[in-house]
Amino acid sequence: MLSQALESGRRISRHIMTLFLFTKSDVLTVLIPITLSTFAAAPHPDVTRMPDIIIWIWLHLLKHDICNQMQDPEEDRKNKPYRPLPAGLITAQNAADVRWLLVPVCLIFSAMYDIKALACSAFLEALSIWYNEFGGDETGLSKNLLTTIAYATLELGAMVVIGSSIDKIWAHAVAFSSVVFATTIHAQDFKDEEGDRLAGRRTLVTLFPAFARMSMMIGIPLWSLYLSRLWKVDLVSSIAFIAYGTIVGARFMVYRTAGAHKQSCKLYSLWYTLVHLLPGYWRFFNST
């Protein structure tokens, strides 16, 4: 009896790990920043709903990522061999079954909170189908546009789940985080450049590599400067934030190996997380 329980526990653990690996690359760039920004930008955040937000965001990421990774598993064998399909942790048919099972799960889970959360869930599904099954990720422009819209929708849905009202500060926070995301999202494409070229995917990095690197070196420090002033960050913190942004941006120009690109993307993810915390700084220090 004990051995059967232990074996069942191991199987469940393997299934959970398999699902997590589908979303692993989005934890630092999507899950953590949006969760933090929801509490930082919300007028009256309810911290007891943090698990609700994390689960809501993760379920929608999982549904999208499974659909995305089913499109071209051979590409992941080159770029991300740890993912469940190239690693042989799940079959394509089982992945498809999970993906479509998650559609009603996400809709029902969203409907438990509010009609607006349900609308966000349905809209995210429409964007995912457009992105994955109708060529939305084939060009850099459409990929960036759809991803930015999806990101903003996730932020709106998370705010609904937390049960907070939406005010001017939140609207500014989402608007600027979306624009920052749209203009720097190609930071994630550097580490996948070789696979994207082999797949014929047209991203800013594959089409205009010199411009893409220059835009990171200039854009991240400039955004750091502007956002520091926008959210009225104190001088010492502003200098530290701008200095860090300058280092991150310069890395994309100076270091060009696959390993360096992965590290640069991690540092970029941290920078983008800090971007999401700035509205919270304003609320704490300047709203009184």
Image (tube, rainbow, N blue to C red):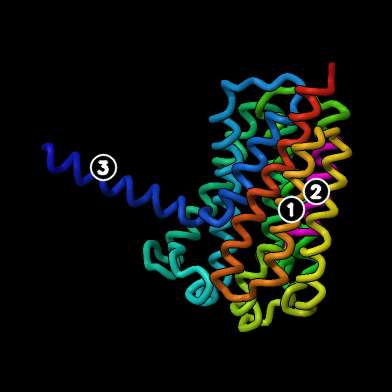
- Residue 189: x and y in percent read 67, 68
Residue 128 appears anywhere in the view: yes
For residue 179: magenta? yes
Q: Under tag 2, what secondary structure?
A: helix
Q: Of the residues tagged 1 and 3, which is closer to the observer?
A: 1
The foreground one among 112 and 190 is: 190
Foreground mark, 2 or 3, reads 2
- Residue 9 numbered tag: 3
Residue 55, position in %: x, y?
Answer: 54, 37
Q: Where is residue 21 shown, x and y percent of the image?
A: 46, 55
- Classify 10 Å Cα crowding around label 3: few (below 14), some (14-19), many (20 and above): few
Q: Residue at x 13, y 42 (%)?
A: 3
Q: Earlier in the sequence, mark 2 or mark 1?
A: 2
The residue segment tinted magenta is 171-185
Which residue shows up at 76% across the image and 37% down it? Answer: 236
With respect to residue 33, does 98 lie above or below?
Answer: below
90 vs 169: above or below: below
**Residues at discs 2 and 1 in contact (Cβ within 8 Å):** yes
Q: Main secondary structure of the magenta part?
A: helix
Rounded to the nearest whole Å, what is the CA distance between mark 1 and mark 3?
44 Å
Instruction: Give the numbered dot on residue 245.
Output: 1
Q: Which residue is disc 2 drawn over? A: 224
Counting residues from the start of the chain, the first of labels 2 and 3 encountered is 3
Q: Which mark is residue 72?
A: none
Judged from the image, the secondary structure of the residue bearing numbered disc 1 is helix
Rendered image quadrant of residue 145 = bottom right
Query: Could you tell which of marks 1 and 3 lies nearer the N-terminus?
Result: 3
> Badge 2 local density, few (<14 within 10 Å), some, or many (20+)?
many
Q: In the depicted view, which residue is nearer to us: 202 or 224?
A: 224
Dot 1: within a 10 Å radius of its alpha carbon, few (fewer than 14), some, or many (20 or more) residues? many
